[in-house]
Image (cartoon, helix red, strand yellow):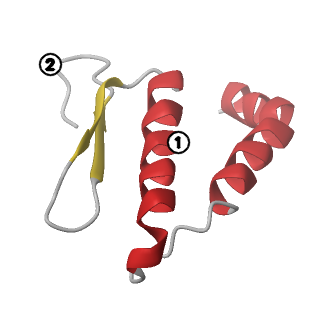
Amino acid sequence: MKNINTYITQNKERFLTELFTLLKIPSISANPAYRSKILTTANAVEHALKAAGCEHAKQIPTQGNPVVYAEKIINKNLPT
């Protein structure tokens, strides 16, 4: 557990910067006027998941707003 705590401590500023960058996108899903910003947010989430090492990160269109889906399978024999 010490290694994960060290990693979090060493990367705290980056984590916060990435989170705040995402939160600053005005993507109010209940308001159609923000549709383009919702797509911007979906793109940012997809990119962040790929950068974090997730496989098959992609956007899935729906009748409303897109859904972002990704997988990170470390060992197929282990439960997820």
**Quarter containing the C terminus:** top left
Residue 47 lies left or right of residue 64; in this view the side is right
Element carrying mark 2: loop
Measuring from the top left, give residue 20's x and y in whole percent.
Answer: 74, 55
Residue at point 39% right, 83% down?
A: 30
Amino acid type, mark 2: Asn
Residue in front for this viewpoint, 41 or 72: 41
- Which corner quadrant of the image does residue 64 belong to? bottom left
Query: In the drawing, what numbered circle is on residue 18?
Result: none
Q: Residue furthest bottom?
A: 30
Dot 2, crowdedness within 10 Å: few (<14), some or many (≥20)?
Answer: few
Q: Nearer the viewer, mark 2 or mark 1?
A: 1
Measuring from the top left, give residue 42's x and y in whole percent.
Answer: 42, 49
Residue in front for this viewpoint, 58 or 72: 58
- Which corner quadrant of the image does residue 17 belong to? top right
Dot 1, crowdedness within 10 Å: few (<14), some or many (≥20)?
Answer: some
Q: Separation of disc 2 and disc 1 at Cα?
A: 31 Å
Residue designated by label 1 = 44
Q: Residue furthest front?
A: 33
Residue at point 70% right, 43% down?
A: 18
Is residue 29 visible in this depiction of the protein? no
Measuring from the top left, give residue 7's x and y in whole percent.
Answer: 74, 28
Amino acid type, mark 1: Ala
Q: Earlier in the sequence, mark 2 or mark 1?
A: 1
Query: In the drawing, what numbered circle is on residue 77?
Result: 2
Residue in front for this viewpoint, 11 or 5: 11
Q: Is residue 71 above or below residue 68?
A: above
